[in-house]
Image (cartoon, rainbow, N blue to C red):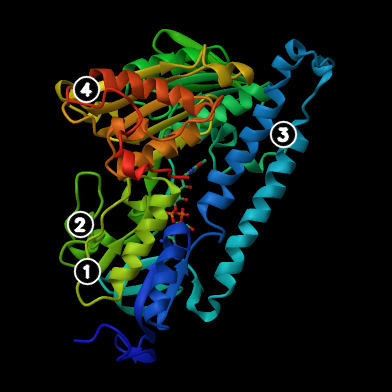
Amino acid sequence: MPILGDTGGEEKGLGAMSKEKRVDVAIIGAGTAGLSACSEVRKATDNFVLLEAGPHGSTCARVGCMPSKVLLQVAHDFHRRHVLGQEGIYGSEHLKVDYRKVLQYVRSLRDHFVQGVLQTVEQLGDHNIQGRVRFREPTVLEVNGQVIRAKRVIIATGSSPIVPGEWQAFSDRILTTDTIFEQEDLPSALAVVGLGAIGVEIGQALARLGCQVTGITQSEHVAGLTDPKVTAYMRETLQHEFPIYTGTITEVAGEGTQLALRFGDRTTRVASILASVGRRPNIAQLGLDALGIPFDTHGLPLYDRTTLQVKGYPIFIAGDVDGDRAVLHEAADDGRIAGFNSVQDEPHCFQRRTRLSIVFCEPNVAVVGRPFAELRQQDIAVGEVGFERQGRAKVMAENTGLLRVYGDKQSGCLLGAELAAPRGEHLAHLLAWAIQKQMTVFDLLQLPFYHPVIEEGLRTALRDLSRQVQASRPGFELAVCDSNAVADLG
Ligand SMILES: Cc1cc2nc3c(=O)[nH]c(=O)nc-3n(C[C@H](O)[C@H](O)[C@H](O)COP(=O)(O)OP(=O)(O)OC[C@H]3O[C@@H](n4cnc5c(N)ncnc54)[C@H](O)[C@@H]3O)c2cc1C
């Protein structure tokens, strides 16, 4: 049976109750994953719809990656005043920050990025339908009372911040990333509850801007790190900027204009809470549970990670809604895979890229490839470098950091790395590329390292790793070559 193009347009249907629209593909959610899916689907058919319930613009541009990075940039710039005096630049003690202006600036850049997404959506014209979607059948959707019958459906509905139920009574003082950038002013004292990537980024930004931040987290882990040494290092580093407590909040009580948070035997009083305790997939309101689709223990339809197809159904899952690798480039890849497969007779399996996640605090935190917690300790060798004495890091007065890189103990093949490092975002990319190309530590050490650069710190860690790998290795980093064919790679 052909997948595409044999029917289309509008017909009377479902007992002639309402006009029925028949499409090849219906994409639910116009975020990064949905729009990427759209661009793949369009290559094969013009008979598709993109259904969006909320404001357009994508989580990334509206309330996620971009506004948070603007806020962090401002905070890091302001924080830089602490090193200017030692460089002989005076007057920084007079610098002031205007929270209202900072937030206006965040929103103005945010609007610029949103505009770019809106332009993409506008180009879709009538394909784009605004409204909340519910499933009636696995391929029959309802939106604004209209029925849409699709051959294939892509669910790309993203996720939303979790606010624990008992906090709802104080909703006017509970901030999330959906609301913080909309504030006219920043609170003077705020508890950041949950110190994953988002909590650490926003917590550090607000602390650097002068808010009195208290970090509260349920476990010892911060910023998505799993390596105990890097975790302890980063936690200690953050503690210099704002206090961090481990504990579960057992009670939130209003005390006048303040909130009293009880955790363990401690009580902290703050003006507001930033709830950064995680995000929940936007799946519950879709009505999937009435369809008889099998779900996993997290309440998600069982789906094949390589094809993104829900097992046994013409439905695909893409982006943060799957709760896996909730970062932008993965959401975009998901969208491409789901979009591509939604217009094939049989879905294709796709190899995923090496895992890479970055937190833009200072020092940057990154987890690359296989996290420490996933590796069998007896199989790996670990190379390590601290950045306190690293040349370029000292020049930049950013000499804080610890990087640990993991390699196969036998072969020296790079497997993963966790780091808190100056300019760590770039080191993380180099490592991810090397891991994806299945390079060994010896391959990497043959590549050029300029001087003086942060990458020399990475080389120190690689040399440390190479010394521990059991495989026979060159006695010299430069490759030996035949004197008749001297290679000049330049
Ligand atoms: C504060 C923050 C900072 C971040 N920083 C980074 C970063 O620096 N780097 C990075 O890689 N990632 C970052 N991320 C993650 C990144 O933003 C996400 O991975 C990405 O935006 C997910 O895209 P998506 O398409 O899956 O979801 P979304 O962009 O959320 O799109 C889902 C869409 O579906 C719509 N929808 C939901 N339910 C329905 C329904 N029933 N019917 C119709 N439409 C519906 C929603 O309104 C939404 O528009 C950050 C996220 C946050 C919150």
Query: What's the amino acid at mark 2?
Result: Asp
Q: Which residue is mark 3?
A: 185
Q: Which residue is mark 2?
A: 304
Q: Nearer the viewer, mark 3 or mark 1?
A: 1
Please report whichever mark, 3 or 4, sits nearer to the chain's N-terminal start: 3
Q: CA distance from mark 3 to mark 1?
A: 49 Å
Please report whichever mark, 4 or 1, sits nearer to the chain's N-terminal start: 1
For label 3, the crowd category at 10 Å Cα-Cα, with few meaning under 14, some 14 to 19 and many 20 or more, is some
Query: What's the amino acid at mark 1?
Result: Pro
Q: Nearer the viewer, mark 4 or mark 2?
A: 4
Residue 372 drawn above or below residue 431: above
Query: What's the amino acid at mark 4?
Result: Val
> Does the numbered disc 4 mark a residue whose Cβ is under 8 Å from ligand 1?
no
Q: CA distance from mark 3 to mark 4?
A: 54 Å
Please report whichever mark, 4 or 2, sits nearer to the chain's N-terminal start: 2
- Left or right, 214 with reference to 477: right
Q: Give the residue drawn at x 62%, y 27%.
A: 206
Residue 435 drawn above or below residue 135: above
Please report whichever mark, 3 or 1, sits nearer to the chain's N-terminal start: 3
Q: Are marks 4 and 2 in contact (CB under 8 Å)?
A: no
Q: Give the residue drawn at x 53%, y 33%.
A: 360
Q: Which residue is mark 4?
A: 469
Quadrant (top left/top right/bottom left/bottom right) for the N terminus:
bottom left
Q: Which mark is residue 347?
A: 1
Q: CA distance from mark 4 to mark 1?
A: 41 Å
Q: Are marks 1 and 2 in contact (CB under 8 Å)?
A: yes
Q: Nearer the viewer, mark 4 or mark 1?
A: 4
Q: Position of residue 299 (x, y in %)?
A: 25, 48
Dot 1: element: loop
